[in-house]
Image (spheres, grey):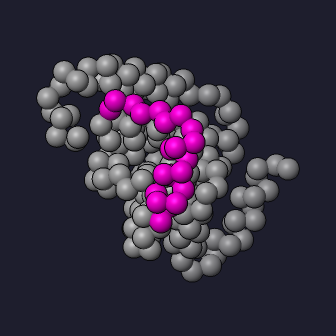
Amino acid sequence: MDINYIFKILEIFQEMQYFYLILIIVSYFYLLLPLPVTPLIIFNSIYFQELSIYLNLFLILLSYLTVYKIIVFLKLNLILEKYVFSRVKKKFFYFNLNLNEFWKVLILRVIIPIPLLNYYLSIKNYKLGISLLATFISLIPYVLILSGTSKDLISEDRGINLSFFILYIFYALTVILLSKFIQKIKFFKIFK
């Protein structure tokens, strides 16, 4: 199936009033579910073009905030911690990084898919401000690469823009170097 077919169908719906708002709301609810985020980021980056980076970051952060508030409001974090995580900890090897919450979230955001980690961080009751900041910082290269490289999917020029990969490598090296010096930097002790 040609990707242009999807956008031709969307052109029909564009004549609806508030089409862009409906598209953003659908994207938001999609992010609340434990579904793959990459197709949504690619779709938004193709459809919204230059605004997609900001839109994707905003929607991901908003979905994490919503999931966090819902889980805390319904007290699901206490129930799951008491009945699930306490038993899992006893039966399995418990791996504990000797890092503060900020760096744990930053590292986990790179490894674990976005929606699953939203649920995990909410259930484990991580500090909301710190985890939102770490989420924002860790998602910048991911969203930049997907948005930057997928904007040209429907155009004739299908070359890969290497500047996004260079930016990601630079960003990853910076995060790794900062994590090596975390114990020496006094500023990050406030995040503990």
Q: Is residue 132 left or right of residue 16?
A: left
Q: Is residue 53 left or right of residue 12?
A: left
- Does residue 21 belong to the magenta stretch? no
Q: Residue at 48% x, 51% y: name it.
A: 86
Q: Residue at 49% x, 36% y: name it.
A: 94
Residue 181, position as x, y percentages in the image: 26, 20
Seen from the viewer's position, the closer of residues 10 and 181 is 181
Seen from the viewer's position, the closer of residues 183 and 62 is 183
Q: Residue furthest left?
A: 186
- Does residue 82 belong to the magenta stretch? yes
Q: Residue furthest bottom?
A: 17
Magenta stretch in the rendered image: 79-99
Q: Quadrant of residue 167?
A: top left
Residue 24, position as x, y percentages in the image: 53, 66
Residue 4, position as x, y percentages in the image: 76, 52
Q: Residue furthest front?
A: 90
Q: How many marks?
A: 0
Q: Is residue 163 visible?
A: no
Q: Residue at 54% x, 51% y: name it.
A: 87
Residue 92, position as x, y percentages in the image: 57, 38
Split into 4 quadrants, where in the image is the C terminus?
top left
Q: Residue at 30% x, 37% y: name it.
A: 100
Q: Is residue 100 visible?
A: yes
Q: Main secondary structure of the magenta part?
A: helix
Seen from the viewer's position, the closer of residues 165 and 115 is 115
